[in-house]
């Protein structure tokens, strides 16, 4: 593995040097071979499970790795904490994948750092498995996300109210730069570090700002680069949240310290999947007031981007026209920043209704069909219709008369209105085909999954694995390890083909008996 450490070169103020805590008896439970191949990890390393357990637990660092904990702040449920940082994670460095894209390799649950405060820095087995399963499911569904390379049982017993087996996750992400990273330096008035961070973020995530399609350098002023950076970050967040909404994903804790600039899903602690459609649905036990409810996620992303914009204002002022008064400099910077934040709503609405248009097989996916989409969601909310199954059945109804009759009874006039619009849009040649809605159905099949990681299935898998390990994971027999691998792999085999229905798929399609009425998720710390 060829590690590089470009983030360390930014300066000591960006991190603390710290090593993972060593554990007594690490055991490799899960290894993501497809991801490992993508990261160009040599076969001789992949075949050495003993070595992988040492790497994945933090007992041994790979050659070239330099362990650090990142510094950042964050708004947590709207309240600002000036110093958070990696309290249970160690960034080992970066590698280039087969597409020459730089990826962070980070251990999570690897022990205390200088940012741990009163935490133990550890992770229990169930949250580690949840992150592995959910991140792989989102990746297969086409959602931007961090991923997991491995899960290693540590052999420790940790306290989470109850005694739990400990584990470490190896997380892979485009980077771990967060809105909270910018807030950390803005809160300290450190504009020099803010400028370094902006320059680095542009180079790493948005090189198109400085380089055109032909590879030629574009000469922009620093102010133009800052504004372009904010616009790119906003676009990434819109894409991410709209993809969450498309599949019914509820992140559960959209704090600014969990908002990655690269636009990937980060942190799977209290996440859940939507069953019966309810825009106010919340599963996270710590989200008392529904701040991060399913339907609020778009607005919260805008709020988070406004907090990023707050951090950039001092930079715009510092590099503004020195002939202006301080008040004029501040007003000019605020006006330019606010213009981008205010554009968010229109940009989000366009992406949102375009996404739902595709879920309904509509070619004209602009705001023309806004009322059709809004009316359907209102019907689904009133009747508590299952989100995934409703769109799946709509897809199937275009070639299945039984499904069509069932939906017409549930959706009434809306269903006929939808078919009329599809009829107006369909190509002339489709009128001669057996399925006259073939093009629309093909589009819907690409956007409406047949299976998702439903909450009750996730919990059943996690409980099963916990029961196999027990509280004492100090010596995991191969037979127990094999059971866990088989249990998770069976589930992931289905989740990795979410748009294809097979015999195995049916096992994981049914709705929870109580429709997740009493289901809650919890933070893994």
Image (cartoon, grey):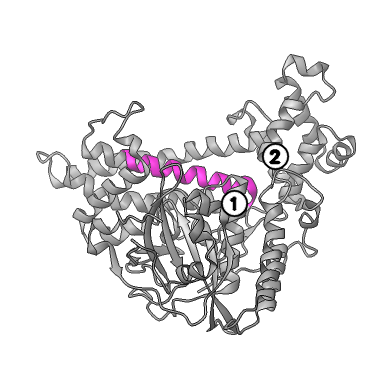
Dot 1 or dot 2: first in sequence order is 1
- Disc 2 marks which residue? 375
Res. 388 visible in picture? yes
Mark 2: secondary structure: helix
Is the C-beta separation of discs 1 and 2 under 8 Å?
A: no
Is 249 placed left or right of 327 in the picture?
right
Res. 454 visible in picture? no
Please state, as top left, top right, bottom left or bottom right, where the N terminus lies in the image: bottom left
Q: Which residues are magenta?
A: 228-248
Q: Is residue 95 on the magenta stretch? A: no
Q: Residues within 10 Å of mark 1 (few under 14, many from 20)?
A: many
Secondary structure that dominates the magenta span: helix
Which residue appears at 43% of the width and 62% of the height? Answer: 106
Q: Is residue 420 above or below residue 285?
A: above
Q: Position of residue 195 (x, y in %)?
A: 23, 50
Q: Position of residue 176 (x, y in %)?
A: 40, 57
CA separation in Å, label 1 and label 2: 27 Å
Q: Is residue 7 above or below residue 77?
A: above
Which residue appears at 78% of the width and 65% of the height? Answer: 514
Residue 138: numbered disc: 1
Which residue appears at 26% of the width and 48% of the height? Answer: 313
């Amino acid at each position: 593995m060829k590690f590089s450490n470009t983030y360390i070169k930014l300066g000591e103020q960006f991190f603390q040097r710290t090593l993972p805590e060593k554990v007594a008896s690490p055991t490799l439970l899960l290894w993501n071979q497809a991801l490992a191949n993508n990261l160009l990890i040599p076969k001789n390393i992949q075949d050495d499970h003993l070595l992988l357990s040492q790497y994945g637990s933090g007992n041994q660092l790979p050659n070239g790795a330099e362990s650090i904990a990142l510094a950042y702040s964050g708004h947590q449920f709207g309240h600002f904490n000036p110093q958070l940082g990696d309290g249970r994670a160690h960034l080992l460095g970066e590698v280039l994948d087969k597409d020459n894209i730089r990826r962070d390799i980070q251990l999570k649950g690897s022990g205390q750092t200088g940012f741990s405060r009163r935490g133990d820095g550890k992770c229990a087995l169930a949250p580690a498995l949840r992150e592995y399963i959910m991140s792989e499911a989102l990746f297969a569904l086409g959602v931007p996300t961090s991923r997991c390379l491995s899960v290693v049982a540590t052999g420790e017993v940790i306290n989470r109210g109850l005694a739990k087996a400990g584990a470490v996750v190896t997380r892979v992400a485009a980077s771990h730069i967060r809105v909270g990273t910018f807030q950390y330096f803005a809160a300290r008035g450190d504009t020099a570090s803010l400028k370094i961070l902006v320059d680095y973020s542009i180079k790493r995530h948005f090189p198109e700002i400085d380089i055109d399609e032909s590879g030629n350098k574009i000469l922009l002023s620093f102010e133009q680069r800052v504004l372009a950076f904010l616009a790119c970050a906003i676009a990434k967040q819109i894409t991410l949240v709209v993809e969450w909404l498309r599949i019914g994903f509820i992140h559960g804790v959209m704090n600014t310290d969990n908002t990655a600039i690269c636009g990937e899903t980060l942190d799977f602690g209290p996440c859940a999947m939507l069953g019966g459609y309810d825009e106010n649905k919340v599963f996270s036990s710590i989200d008392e007031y529904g701040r991060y409810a399913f339907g609020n996620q778009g607005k919260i992303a805008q709020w988070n981007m406004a907090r990023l914009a707050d951090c950039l204002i001092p930079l715009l002022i510092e590099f503004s026209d020195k002939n202006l008064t301080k008040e004029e400099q501040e007003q000019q910077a605020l006006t330019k920043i606010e213009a981008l934040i205010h554009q968010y709503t229109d940009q989000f609405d366009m992406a949102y209704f375009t996404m739902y248009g595709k879920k309904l097989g509509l070619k004209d996916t602009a705001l023309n069909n806004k009322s059709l989409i809004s009316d359907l969601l209102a019907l689904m909310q009133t009747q508590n219709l299952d989100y995934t199954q409703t769109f799946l059945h709509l897809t199937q109804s275009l070639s299945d008369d039984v499904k069509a009759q069932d939906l017409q009874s549930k959706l009434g006039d809306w269903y006929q209105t939808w078919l009329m619009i599809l009829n107006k849009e369909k190509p002339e040649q489709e009128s001669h085909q057996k399925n006259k809605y073939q093009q629309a159905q093909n589009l819907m099949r690409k956007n409406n999954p047949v299976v998702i990681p439903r909450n009750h299935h996730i919990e059943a898998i996690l409980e099963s694995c916990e029961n196999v390990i027990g509280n004492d994971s100090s010596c995991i027999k191969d037979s127990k390890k094999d059971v866990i691998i088989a249990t998770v792999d069976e589930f992931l085999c289905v989740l990795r083909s979410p748009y294809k229905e097979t015999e195995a798929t049916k096992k994981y399609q049914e709705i929870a008996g109580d429709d997740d009425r009493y289901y809650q998720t919890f933070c893994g710390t």
